[in-house]
Amino acid sequence: MKSVSPRLLHSEPMRRCRLEKCRAACCLHGAWVKVEKAEEILASAHLIKHHVPPGQRSTEKWFDGRQEPDEHVKGRQVVHTTVVDDPDHYGGTACVFTRSDHKCALQVAGEAEGRHRWHFKPFYCILHPLDLDEKGCITLDTNDSLLDEPGSCLRPAGRRIPLLETFEEELRYLLGDAEYEELLNKLP
C-alpha cells in the first residue's frame, strides 16, 4: 500500500470535522488492529494504562478475541479492540481506548512519551475516514452519506478543497513526505 486512488487527486467541498464537534464518533465500533501492533500495545501497557479510562485498564480486556485475515497489513491478521457500553458516547458504545475527553488513550500515551502521537495508534484508526480500495490504494468512500451523517469525520465546506490537503497529515504519515510531495505535483 504505497499509493492513492485517483479520487484523492481531486478537490471536493468537504473538510474534516473537529474532535469537539464529532466527539470521536468514529470510535463507536472499536477498531481492527494488526496482531503485531496489538502485541506492541500490550507490551507497552505500562506506558498506556494510566491514560485509559478508569474501569478499562485491565489489559486482558483491551482486545475482544476476534481475529480475522487482512491482506492489507503486515502479518495478514488483525484483532479487534473491545467495545464497551458508553451512554455518553455517540451511539452508546465506544472503543475501550476512548476517553471521556473523546481522545484516544493510545494517542495520548504516544504524545506523553514524546513519540509521534500516532505511535501506538492502529493503522485503520490513523487512516479513518480514508479507506483502502480493492487494490490496497488509499481512497475515500464515494458514499454521499459521509457528509450527511451527524457522527461523520467529514463536514460540508463552502468551497472545493483538494482532498490531498484535507488529509495531508494522514497521507504524510502513511506515505512519507517524499511520496506526498510527488502527489501534490500531480494536482490539476
Image: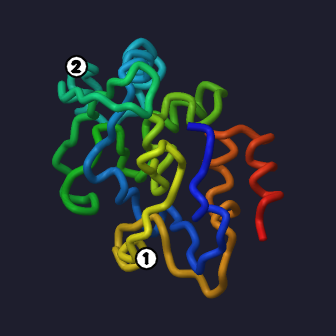
Q: Residue at x 43, y 42 (%)?
A: 124
Q: Is residue 11 above or below residue 44?
A: below
Disc 1 crowd, CA 10 A, few/some/many (<14, 14-19, 20+):
some
Residue 111, image quadrant: top right
What colour scheme does the image use? Answer: rainbow
Pointers 1 and 2 in contact (C-beta within 8 Å): no
- In terms of secondary structure, where does tag 1 sit? helix
Q: Amino acid at mark 1?
A: Leu
Bin the neighbour count of mark 2 within 10 Å (Cα to Cα): few under 14, some 14-19, many 20 and up.
few
Is 51 in front, or is 120? 120
Extreme residue in the bottom direction: 158
Residue beneath the point at 42% across and 52% down: 101
Total numbered labels placed on residues in the image? 2
The kind of residue tagged 2 is Glu
Residue 13: give x, y in percent of width and height: 59, 80
Task: Please give left or right for residue 31 compared with residue 155 in the image.
Answer: left
* Residue ID for mark 2: 60
Relative vertical location of residue 43 with respect to residue 165 in this rendering, above or below: above
Up-down relation of residue 178 to residue 139 (above or below): above
Q: Position of residue 78 (x, y in %)?
A: 32, 28
- Give the secondary structure at mark 2: helix
Q: 121 or 13: which is nearer to us?
A: 13
For the residues labelled 1 and 2, the Cα–Cα distance comes to 37 Å
Given residues 25 and 102, the one toward you in this image is: 25
The residue located at (78%, 71%) in the rendering is 188
- Nearest the viewer among 161 and 3 is 3
When asked about the image quadrant of residue 77, the answer is top left
Mark in front: 1 vs 2: 1
Task: Spot the residue most to the front.
Answer: 135
Which numbered marker is on residue 147? 1
